[in-house]
Image (tube, helix red, strand yellow):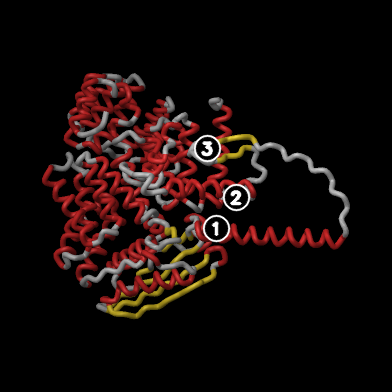
């Protein structure tokens, strides 16, 4: 029998309650599995609850996954059943609604907990028997708690953050070196099984701020924090680092390294070892050591610093520095991966990438993988590059492999959504992936901004507006996307106020804010004002949005066709926003999608 709306709402509330429990919130893979099967069932899409589909969508297996050769879904289903049972025996013991995953399939079951039948009062036993029974019960409880603790300890990754290392060098211009070492430490820790480090963008939100570790730990939702300093004088290097337990400010480990600059990789490795040993983890696959010249590494760190200080503009400008690093050492894989990402970013700022540009980007990313097949950044870069070539299967394989190698990198989550899921119209999945990414990057606004975009595409305008309103006032794009969310809610006057304030505060006719302004004028019935925007802006996207606001089908499609040179990623991303829903079924738009390599 299908669930009623009331049933569905209750089931969703119970799902969120279960996923918020420590038993699930600290196990990303299990949470993703449960959310996937529950969402598909509650959305009436039970046909997707097949082993082959789950393997691809939840566990990142290839589209040609063969369940007979890889039992990942069956294995994890058994663990999910056990974890649900543990939840309802402990923190969920009083929950009225129970979620189960019956054996033999992957369709969840939701049912009301049956009241416990009354048990007749027992006959009086001798006192010595009562004591024996009590002792046995206590032993059973203790054994159960120990088993639960071992399962929980093994499965729950340790949340940790690396705060920006303080630059103690006489030259303030060497900040990039301290920042680069911080970023490299985060990357190294992300490769260690059992650790869940916060993304570099969240950690760097605290750069230059007074340090209250308990407050920072609370904001970052971490158990441990790594902090320290860097002093570089000539070719000498001193690095101090310590690992602090957040809840009581207790330093678990500290280290000081006075070395030559050429020992910088050994220092990073020893810091990782100290942290791992203090937390009683195994280093495992976390040993990623590179050998390169100090000149190449210095150039590489300068390029990386440009990326995380200046955002997209810095990433575009970092191309030359990565090329210089490669010229110093052609075998340094991270420099090749950085160059691939920078070239890809640069191709997204103009009128699309030429075939020669795409070929160069692909060769650069493949060179990085040739030098280091386990480099997550290289797989992520290729995911973006293949998407620009409309090679969607190869793109998804690369992104999934990148997240498999580094499941804590919020940049990869954002790029997966913007370059693959959005253009292909997989909006619900985009929202889920972004929600996972936000857990790893809880402080900085980038992923929350992308999540607001995804919620608008999903028609969840109220939630999107909430995310936009909590972004910093100065965050690029905040006003225009808040206005779009308000327009989706039908709050046209408020949307116009927001976007007109943004334009008055400085927006050129090439600025994307003009697209929202033109659309808002059209929705408000101010056709003369909308026509002025359309005539003044030379950007086809701005024109398309303005014409869509006026419900002008012919000119909207004409402007969208002029966007074809942007390529499948940027065109596909925009086509999936609700403003263009009224033209999606037009044969000309279907032909345009086919021309650029987008599925219908």
Q: Give left or right: position of 209 versus 360.
A: right
Residue at left 87%, top 55%?
125
Q: 572 above or below 133?
A: above
Q: 91 above or below 200?
A: above
Q: Secondary structure at mark 2?
A: helix
Q: Which mark is residue 108?
A: 3
- Mark closer to the chain start, 2 or 1: 2
Residue neighbourhood size for the residue with mark 3, other residues' Cα within 10 Å, grouped as few (<14), some (14–19), many (≥20): some
- Mark closer to the chain start, 1 or 3: 3
Q: Which mark is residue 86?
A: 2
Determine the image quadrant of residue 509.
Answer: top left
Q: Position of residue 596 (x, y in %)?
A: 19, 33
Separation of residues labelled 2 and 1 (CA atoms):
10 Å
Q: Which mark is residue 316?
A: none
The single residue placed furthest to the front in the displayed view is: 68
Residue neighbourhood size for the residue with mark 2, other residues' Cα within 10 Å, grouped as few (<14), some (14–19), many (≥20): some
Residue at left 27%, top 67%?
173
Determine the image quadrant of residue 409.
Answer: bottom left
Q: Give left or right: position of 243 versus 575.
A: right
- Mark closer to the chain start, 3 or 2: 2
Separation of residues labelled 1 and 3 (CA atoms):
23 Å
Q: Position of residue 323 (x, y in %)?
A: 16, 60
Q: Secondary structure at mark 1?
A: helix
The single residue placed furthest to the left in the displayed view is: 356
Q: Which residue is mark 1?
A: 151
């Amino acid at each position: 029998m299908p669930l009623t709306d009331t049933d569905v709402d209750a089931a969703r509330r119970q799902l969120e309650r279960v996923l918020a429990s420590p038993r699930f919130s600290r196990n990303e893979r299990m949470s993703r599995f449960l959310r996937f099967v529950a969402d598909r069932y509650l959305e009436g899409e039970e046909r997707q609850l097949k082993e082959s589909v789950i393997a691809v969508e939840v566990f990142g297996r290839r589209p040609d996954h063969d369940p007979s050769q890889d039992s990942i879904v069956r294995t994890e289903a058994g663990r999910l059943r056990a974890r649900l049972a543990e939840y309802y025996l402990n923190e969920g013991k009083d929950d009225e609604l129970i979620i189960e995953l019956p054996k033999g399939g992957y369709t969840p079951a939701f049912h009301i907990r049956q009241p416990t039948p009354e048990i007749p009062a027992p006959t009086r036993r001798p006192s010595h028997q009562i004591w024996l029974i009590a002792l046995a019960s206590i032993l059973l409880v203790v054994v159960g708690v120990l088993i639960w603790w071992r399962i929980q300890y093994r499965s729950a990754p340790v949340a940790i953050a690396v705060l920006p290392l303080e630059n103690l060098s006489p030259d303030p211009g060497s900040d990039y070196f301290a920042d680069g070492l911080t970023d490299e430490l985060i990357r190294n820790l992300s490769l260690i099984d059992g650790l869940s480090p916060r993304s570099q963008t969240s950690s760097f939100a605290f750069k230059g701020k007074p340090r209250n570790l308990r407050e920072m730990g609370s904001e970052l939702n971490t158990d441990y924090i790594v902090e320290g300093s860097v002093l570089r004088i000539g070719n000498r290097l001193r690095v101090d680092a310590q690992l602090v337990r957040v809840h009581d400010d207790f330093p678990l480990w500290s280290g000081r390294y006075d070395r030559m600059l050429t020992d910088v990789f050994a220092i990073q490795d020893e810091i990782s070892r100290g942290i791992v040993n203090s937390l009683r983890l195994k280093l495992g696959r976390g040993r990623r050591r590179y050998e390169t010249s100090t000149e190449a590494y210095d150039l590489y760190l300068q390029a990386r610093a440009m990326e995380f200080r200046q955002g997209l503009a810095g990433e575009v400008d970092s191309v030359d520095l990565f090329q210089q690093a490669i010229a110093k050492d052609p075998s340094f894989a991270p420099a090749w991966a950085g160059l691939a990402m920078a070239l890809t970013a640069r191709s997204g700022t103009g009128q699309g990438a030429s075939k020669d540009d795409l070929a160069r980007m692909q060769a650069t990313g493949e060179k990085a993988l040739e030098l280091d097949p386990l480099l997550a950044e290289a797989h992520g870069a290729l995911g973006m590059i293949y998407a620009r070539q409309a090679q969607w299967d190869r793109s998804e394989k690369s992104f999934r492999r990148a997240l498999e190698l580094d499941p804590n990198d919020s940049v990869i989550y954002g790029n997966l959504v913007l370059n693959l899921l959005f253009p292909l119209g997989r909006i619900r999945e985009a929202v889920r992936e972004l929600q996972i990414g936000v857990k790893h990057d809880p402080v900085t606004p980038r992923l929350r901004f992308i999540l607001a975009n995804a919620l608008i595409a999903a028609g969840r305008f109220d939630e999107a507006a909430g995310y936009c309103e909590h972004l910093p006032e100065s965050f690029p794009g905040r006003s225009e996307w808040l206005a779009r969310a308000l327009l989706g809610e039908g709050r046209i006057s408020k949307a116009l106020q927001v976007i007109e304030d943004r334009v008055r505060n400085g927006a050129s006719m090439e600025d994307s804010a003009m697209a929202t302004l033109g659309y808002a004028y059209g929705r408000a019935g101010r056709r003369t004002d909308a026509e002025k925007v359309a005539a003044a802006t030379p950007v086809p996207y701005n024109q398309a949005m303005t014409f869509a606001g006026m419900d002008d089908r012919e000119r909207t499609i004409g402007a969208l066709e002029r966007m074809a040179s942007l390529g499948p990623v940027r065109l596909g991303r925009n086509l999936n926003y609700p403003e263009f829903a009224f033209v999606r079924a037009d044969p000309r738009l279907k032909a345009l999608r086919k021309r650029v390599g987008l599925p219908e």
